[in-house]
Structures are given as structure tokens and as C-alpha cells.
Amino acid sequence: MGVRIRLKRFGTKKKPHRRIVVCDKRRARDGKTIEEIGYYDPSKTPPVMVVDKERARYWLSNGATPSEIVKTLLKKQGVL
């Protein structure tokens, strides 16, 4: 089973926000997740991002691979 850390879309039409989730890489983008570890709202000024750093490090140490966007977000938060 390949585990990924990626973004899951929430919100209304034209006003989306994202949750940072851990899920099986074969699942759909908005499908079932293993755990939610944070959220990201780019529509705010400045963009709002909250990540549970401890849980993110846990999943990364257990072999979860972040998507490209999540990788840059985690670098900004100091997790990677």
C-alpha cells in the first residue's frame, strides 16, 4: 500500500480551501482518508496554513510520500 500526503478539496464553488490529508495513493482526491493533519486556505491574505508537524513527521518517517504542492508547503512550515 502506497501512502501519500496530499490536498483534499473542500469549500463551495469559487471559494475552495484544502485539507492536508494522509491517504492511500489509489484513492480518489476527495475519497476516504487515513488522517487529516492540517489545512490550507490560499484565498485569505496572507494564505492560512496550519499543520500538525509532529504527525507530518511521523507519516514521513513511516514512508508516506508528499505530493509536489504539499512538499513545498511542508518546507515553508519547517517540517522538511
Image: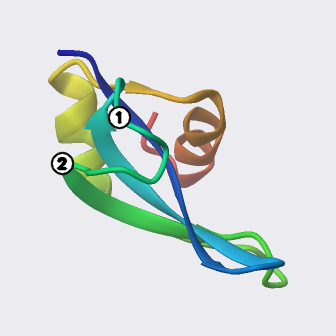
Crowd around label 1: few <14 · some 14–19 · many ≥20 (10 Å): few
- Quadrant of residue 28 within the rendered picture: top left
Q: Residue at x 84, y 84 (%)?
A: 45
Instruction: Report the Cα–Cα distance between label 2 and label 1.
Output: 11 Å
Q: Nearer the viewer, residue 78 or 32?
A: 32
- In the image, residue 34 lies at what x, y percent? 18, 48
Question: Quick one: label 2, few (<14), some, or many (20+) residues within 10 Å?
Answer: few
The quadrant of the image that shows the N terminus is: top left
* In this rendering, the label closer to the viewer, 2 or 1: 1
According to the picture, the residue beneath numbered tag 2 turns out to be 34
Ranked by sequence position, the earlier of labels 2 and 1 is: 1
Q: Position of residue 41 (x, y in %)?
A: 66, 74
Numbered badge on residue 77: none
- The image shows residue 39 at horizontal and vertical percentages of 48, 68
Residue 63 appears in the rendering = yes
Question: Residue 51: in sight, yes or no?
Answer: no
Residue drawn at x 42%, y 43% is 79
Residue occupied by mark 1:
27
The residue type indicated by label 1 comes to Arg
Q: Up-down: is 71 above or below 17?
A: above
Under mark 2, the amino acid is Ile
Q: Is residue 8 left or right of residue 76?
A: left
Element assignment for label 2? loop
The secondary structure type at the circle numbered 1 is loop
The foreground one among 33 and 66 is 33
